[in-house]
Image (cartoon, rainbow, N blue to C red):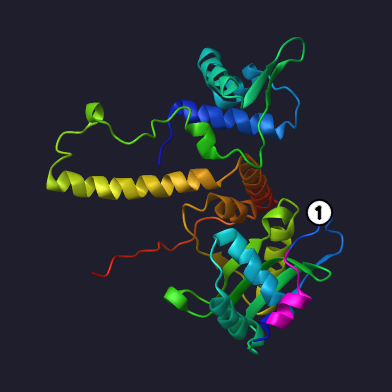
Amino acid sequence: MKLQKNSRLALYSILEFAAASGRPVAAAEIAEKYGVAPHHLAKVLAELARAGIVESIRGVGGGYRFAGNARRLTLFDVICHFEDLSPTDAERREPGERTQAGRAIATVLSEIDEIAQATFKSITIATMLQLMERQGAGRTAARS
Amino acid sequence: MGTKTATKQARPAPPPAGRARTEVRPVRRGDLAAVIAIDARVTGIEKRAYWRGIYRRYADADAPGRQFLVAADGPVVLGFVIGEVRDWEFGSPPCGWVFAIDVHPEARQSGLGTMLLAAIARGFRRAGVTKVRTLLSRDNSLILSFFRSQGMMAGPFIPLEMDLD
């Protein structure tokens, strides 16, 4: 499973903002930590702001902060702004899709998509923060 | 089955607020009407015969691995959880299975589901298992999210099915 770069950037940013508990986080800080171009990140943050998931705080000490409900917002709610999750339309049909083999392959791919979407829909930002904490604690314990 | 008696003893409507007095305890016969009412409210289908069978299997039976617990605030049942330890099902070493968990819709968002799951997990540990599993519809995002929030991840099994013509 691979996410679009913008989806990953959106998730990195939201997790950083949600972990900051209301403190604005500078976009430059995110760009540096995840090794991405600031102008690329700015486009992603603008989309998240349009969706009401983050808000921009102007002035000294400004940046972005999380504006959603971490216990309700799921990974799917975020990535749906960046991934093409709609059913295949006529213009995007792959060669051979209407053949018997093409339909069988489409059935299998659709099964995979459904499972992936169910997974994204079931994991909230709060759950991701817990997972990060557990994995961080696990790594710390392994090192000591 | 004393359904009429149960109706008198257990009221399904939750109190408006406050969970200070809520306890998780083994189900009693008098709780069954409230359990049936919560399930009917959530699923839209009342299944009295089914729940009487579940009660006999999980509450009446003297089987240490089986648990049928309720979260109750005094006489008011607010939620329930059911599960049991199964040995070598699907080739798996003994583990605890949670078959059902539900909280009255008006009593949600107050930690009752977490209390119920923690209680049944304690019972599973006492029964000697270190793994808990469950299975639910992938459309059920609400309950999937709940189990995820409790730390559950996808297990090593894939459920399969087919139509029998």
Q: Residue drawn 66% across and 46% down?
A: A130
Q: Residue drawn 57% across and 19% down?
A: A50
- A36 in relation to A71, above or below: above
- A14 in relation to B84, above or below: above
Mark 1 chain: B
Where residue A131 appears, as percent x and y from the top left, is 62, 47
The residue lying toward the viewer, choosing from A24 and A103, is: A103
Q: Quadrant of the rendered structure where residue B115 is? A: bottom right
* Magenta region, main secondary structure: helix
| Secondary-structure class at tag 1 | loop
The region drawn magenta spans B4-12
The residue lying toward the viewer, choosing from A142 and A102, is: A102
- Magenta stretch contains residue A114: no
Residue highlighted by disc 1: B16
Local packing at callout 1 (Cα closer than 10 Å; few below 14, some 14-19, many 20+) is few
Where residue B152 appears, as percent x and y from the top left, is 58, 57
Does B35 sit left or right of B15 as displayed? left
Does B42 sit left or right of A91 as displayed? right
Looking at the rendered image, the quarter that the N terminus of chain A falls into is top left
Does A99 sit left or right of B36 as displayed? left
